[in-house]
Image: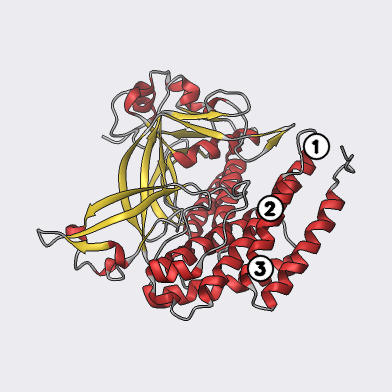
Amino acid sequence: MRNDLRTIAGKLGVDVEQLAGNAVLLLPENMESASAGEDFCDAGDSLLLAKLLKREKVPCTTAFDLGVRPKVLDRRGADVWLGLLWLFAENGFFPVAVSVLSEWISTKFMQGSQAGDSESPLDEPTKVHVELCVQRKNAMSRIKFEGSARDFIAVLSAQKELGNRGEE
Amino acid sequence: MKNEAPQTVESVERWVNVKIHEWLGLMEAEDFVSAAKLSIDAIHEHCRRSTKDASVPFRQFHFGVRVALNALRDLANIKIIVADDRWLSVPEAVETVWGCAHDARDRLVGYSGLDAGFLAYCLDELNPLFAAIESRYGFGLYMSWELVLDGYTCSICNSDVRGCEHISGRWYGEQECRWHSDGGYIRAVSLVQNPRDPRCRIWPWLKRRNENGHIVIEEVPIYIIFTPEGDDDGGEIIDAVTLFRNGRKPTGNGRATASVALDAAAIEGKPEFQDF
């Protein structure tokens, strides 16, 4: 069964209300398969992303913030691993969250491209690995994304655009 | 005891500009050994400058100069090797050039804050070397590990980094934030085409067949400690004669390696591994 907020809250041992008030949840990448706190693993890149979001005052909660202490999975590849990223489209901070995320990914992408030798696979766009959930009042979209940074930013822009239309 | 004038960003900048000018002259004259020696001597001299009571901007500048001097040494060392036309056929020479070229590029792009024109000149020296290696040996395969850690501790506040606001590499007052890993074990080692550290490359000469007929890959670095500022001793000048005659790789350069042996039977014949 796929995770919904209630299931996740149950696994983390918190009330579902503690999750719903956020703009962003950055959760362990094995949230679905792991059954208990000690098995959870935060994706390495999610640690920095959480800090960047919080610095911009985006209401963002991680499993650690909720009293769980997941392990951290550090991969020595160039790709970006974000784990389970849950965005709440109705939250007023949603556009800011998307901007922070897009800007951060763009920066990483640009750094990867600085190396020159554009024909080398070393300079291929950094790939992003994330399970992206976008929660709206009456619907939720879920994307298991593994692709280029450029495509991920396009996905985020589309979600932001949808959010804008919803406000009109 | 002689009283030395206090160092300032301006005085160090003048000093390093003179050193770079001298280094460029030696490189133009193709006296690469002297260029490497000049860089190493300059690192010695620079490391003797005390930064103990210096301001944060001076310390950052001091660090950048040290990184830049290390890059100059790397470039001179590379030139010592590639001056010999045989270098692309000698495994130790190829590995050394590859490692030094990545060290130099990381130092030049990431840390030094050099003048843009000089930076472009240095990078232009490196790009043909990467192209030559890729042309001969392909884009390559690399080792990449997955490490399960208990977490990271922040050097500023000594707490789990998930519970503080500090960001690794940023300065907070007089202190630079560093994240130190806690505990951990290697969960998996992968072969990848897009590594975080291209120094962990699997070269064709690292494979052999064992008694079962399987390809075994040996002595592949899975982790290399790279410090942009290098060592206080300034590193070493590549001894090209020994390198080409005995295949001895330089041991210094502030790096530590761990090696693995892989039974590569599972990847034999797969097109994505044809470079290998």
Please state the horizontal and vertical placement of residue B220, each as a whole percent of the image: 34, 55
The residue positioned farthest toward the front in the image shown: B1
At 59% from the left and 26% from the top, the residue drawn is B164
| Image vertical order of residue A84 relative to residue A40, above or below | below
Q: Which residue is mark 3?
A: B34
Q: Is residue B54 left or right of residue A69?
A: right
Please state the horizontal and vertical placement of residue A8, each as a whole percent of the image: 37, 27
Amino acid at pointer 1:
Ala
Q: Earlier in the sequence, mark 1 or mark 3?
A: 3
Marks 3 and 2 on same chain: yes
Chain to which the residue tagged by mark 2 belongs: B
| Image vertical order of residue B76 relative to residue A68, above or below | below
The number of numbered badges drawn on the structure is 3
Q: Residue B43, labelled with which disc? A: 2
- Nearest to the observer: residue B45 or residue A19: B45
- Nearest to the observer: residue B108 or residue A100: B108
Residue contact between numbered discs 1 and 3, judged by CB atoms under 8 Å: no
Q: Determine the secondary structure under disc 3.
A: helix
Please state the horizontal and vertical placement of residue B235, each as a whole percent of the image: 58, 54
Q: Tell me the distance, in whole angstroms, between the alpha carbons under discs 3 and 2.
A: 14 Å
Q: Nearer the viewer, mark 1 or mark 3?
A: 3
Q: Earlier in the sequence, mark 1 or mark 2?
A: 2
The answer to whether residue B170 shows anywhere in this view is yes
The answer to whether residue A117 shows anywhere in this view is no
Q: Residue B54, labelled with which disc? A: 1
Q: Earlier in the sequence, mark 3 or mark 2?
A: 3
